Amino acid sequence: MQLRQYVELQKELAVNYCHLAVCCVDSPEINDAFRTGLGAQYPFLSDHERKVVNLLDMTETSKSRGVTAMPHTFSLLPDLTIHNLYNGYWFVGRPTLDELRDDLRAMMRKVRPDYEGPVG
């Protein structure tokens, strides 16, 4: 569901010179098929060996599913520092499109002195 929403957002981001990328724990082949099925224009990176997931401690262990990668969303500034982080293990922890737009506005205010943001 979240990735479908990102497909809706991708054209809006392109107009604003913003980029979107997804990193999944599936193999590159599965990621490519999923990306194509969604109609996503943004890259799907593969962490099928779970190196990044383990390095950033983005796992949870349960009796029924074992070690599971927890979904996270990062809003990154142009220098790749983290502006905001969402832990979406529970679906309500994932950012809405409006929250991502708010992040983009806040980041624009930080990096563009000529940007004042929405008025009113």
Image (tube, helix red, strand yellow):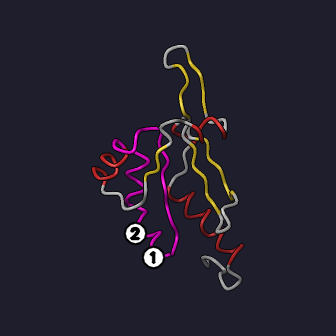
SS type, badge 2: helix
Residue drawn where x is 51% and y is 75% of the image: 17
Residue 39 falls in image quadrant: bottom left
Per the rendered image, the range of residues in magenta is: 1-30
Q: Residues within 10 Å of mark 2 (few under 14, many from 20)?
A: few
Q: Is residue 12 above or below residue 116?
A: above
x and y, in percent, of residue 43 in the image? 43, 57
Residue 75 has which mark? none
How many marks the image carries: the answer is: 2
Q: Residue furthest bottom?
A: 114
Pick the residue in front: 44 or 101: 44
Residue position for label 2: 11
Residue drawn where x is 61% and y is 58% of the image: 75
Circles 2 and 1, Cβ within 8 Å, touching? The answer is: yes
SS type, badge 1: helix
Residue position for label 1: 15
The answer to whether residue 14 is magenta is yes
Residue 62 falls in image quadrant: top right
Pick the residue in front: 57 or 10: 57
